[in-house]
Amino acid sequence: FKVSLVSTSPIDGQKPGTSGLRKKVKVFKQPNYLHNFVQSTFNALTPEKVKGATLVVSGDGRYYSNDAVQIIIKMAAANGVRRVWVGKNTLLSTPAVSAVIRERSGADGSKATGGFILTASHNPGGPTEDFGIKYNMENGGPAPESITDKIYENTKTIKEYPIAEDLPIVDISAIGVSSFEGPEGKFDVEVFDSADDYVKLMKSIFDFESIRKLLSSPKFSFCYDAMHGVAGAYAHRIFVEELGAQESSLLNCVPKEDFGGGHPDPNLTYAKELVARMGLGKSDTGVEPPEFGAAADGDADRNMILGKRFFVTPSDSVAIIAANAVGAIPYFSTGLKGVARSMPTSAALDVVAKSLNLKFFEVPTGWKFFGNLMDAGMCSVCGEESFGTGSDHIREKDGIWAVLAWLSILAHKNKETLDGDAKLVTVEDIVRKHWATYGRHYYTRYDYENVDAGKAKELMEHLVKLQSSIPEVNKMVKGIRSDVANVSSADEFEYKDPVDGSISKHQGIRYLFEDGSRLVFRLSGTGSEGATIRLYIEQYEKDASKTGRESHEALSPLVDIALKLSKMEEFTGRSAPTVIT
Ligand code: VG1
Ligand code: CO
């Protein structure tokens, strides 16, 4: 193939957010839009990560992935990349990309030094919806801010990019290697099975035999909803072939480029089918729900865990996994190195860390901050309130891993009950026992999507201004409700990375109450239009006799305070959030 240099000019708005660049497909289809971003990324990397390197390119298979992968292949070839690895049909979940970068070796022993993930994660897909791209580093984790800042700077000055226009379209639907010869030598594209490396990794972490026994027990029943995302490419292999679950336990497990028209975000609002099956829908289905249910988002890094008629909050989920990992999961048999959560995630994990005497870290929102801790051997298990849970087996959150972790805990707790007449220890039993031991963090998140960006900014500025006088805030709080604790401090969260010393500012506005309750406000960094305000509300209850209340009831005083303090309706014109999780 030949390499040609194409002139281009900067395009506004290519700043990567919490997790890469996400825009409407029609924005990505503009001339040079994807090209500019990809070249700006190559230019942000050290030369040896490009010239002669091996790169992974794949994603959740959403609309435009097939075009994008061919463009990236042509640009990789022209930039002197030695080989590109692509999952069959461009499918690799985000955790699988991380695993492939870390674990996979080519026939000649080659290893990947990074990869492009083509996904907008939980955002809908299709011609009128979102596409996205992000770059992951040699450790398998998202590029740190130092790199994403450099990428953004490059997008503002880019003048040209090289491309191998005459490289034929590579067939990515068949496993095999296509070899080409360019001005700088050989260039290969290798298409491989999307699931092999990931399945191998999961089998090295969990005791599949004990999970298989649980899944085959007549006392247990299971359901998994991939929401037509890429998790479907793994679910059949792992749950059915390896673990013996029934075909009928898989819902929406055929990956589709538009996610079947749905919103592939695993929560109680969008995972409607699973929610109904688990007995949590508005009307009774008349069928006895399964004991365990779970769902994933488009790129399969998120998870929602449900028991029969029971919702597990993601903040509780990571705390429960941390509390039970040693003993239940072979990978952790020698203990946990430490645990971490994102700032808005509830403090349920903090209580476990304290009681088990584990190192504990609180990082800004987004998985990239966990990677440094893990690379330094300081953190084994971590999670976010946004349905993200994971461990140091890779450097991304991992939806299927979380399901296997829960199944392992259930298998462990039911060692004695699967045979004989004893009653099954259920998901709900495990959670209630956890609350009785550690106390309960009532928790909810209100999302106001697609709000006017200027108004959202004004609301945030208003909340920061209020923080200058805590006595004033307390006067307002008491005027709204007399039954809540005093605000003890308020700030904007700032993080100093304990490994590299880098500082991240303005990571969310916090109001901390004397009884441990918290209100957190931040603007989303993953949307593609307007602004999304996220409001996180949390209240800690230590008294075991009071941990069984309805969450919305327990939290209603704090919700009241949050909405009035922030003047939410006044600024946004919204009397209710778009989504409550
Ligand atoms: C959201 C979540 C955050 C998560 C991020 C990426 O970010 O709040 O916890 O890490 O999405 O998840 P934001 O900035 O919109 O609040 V994924 O599964 O969309 O890559
Ligand atoms: Co995701």
Image (cartoon, rainbow, N blue to C red):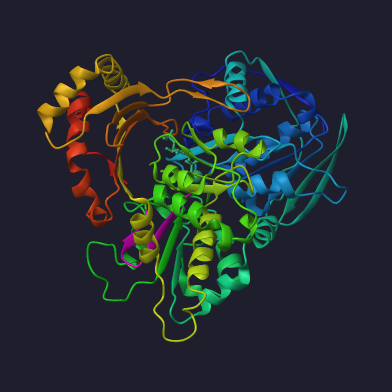
Against 105, is 489 above or below?
above
Q: Where residue 423 sits: x, y (%)?
A: 39, 79
Q: Is residue 305 magenta?
A: yes
Q: Is residue 501 left or right of residue 265?
A: right
Q: Is residue 22 left or right of residue 42?
A: left
* In-front residue for pair 24/117: 117
What residue is rendered at 73% in x and 54% in y?
192
Q: Which residues are magenta?
A: 302-312
Q: Where residue 440 sits: x, y (%)?
A: 32, 50
Q: Is residue 573 magenta?
A: no
Against 1, is 268 above or below?
below
What residue is rendered at 11% in x and 34% in y?
482
* In-front residue for pair 513/163: 513
What residue is rendered at 75% in x and 24% in y?
46
* In-front residue for pair 262/147: 147
Q: Is residue 247 left or right of residue 332?
A: left
Q: On the rendered image, what quadrant is the N terminus found in? A: top right
Residue 447 sits in which quadrant? top left
Q: Where residue 231 sits: x, y (%)?
A: 54, 56
Ligand 1 quarter of the rendering = top left
What residue is rendered at 45% in x and 70% in y?
222
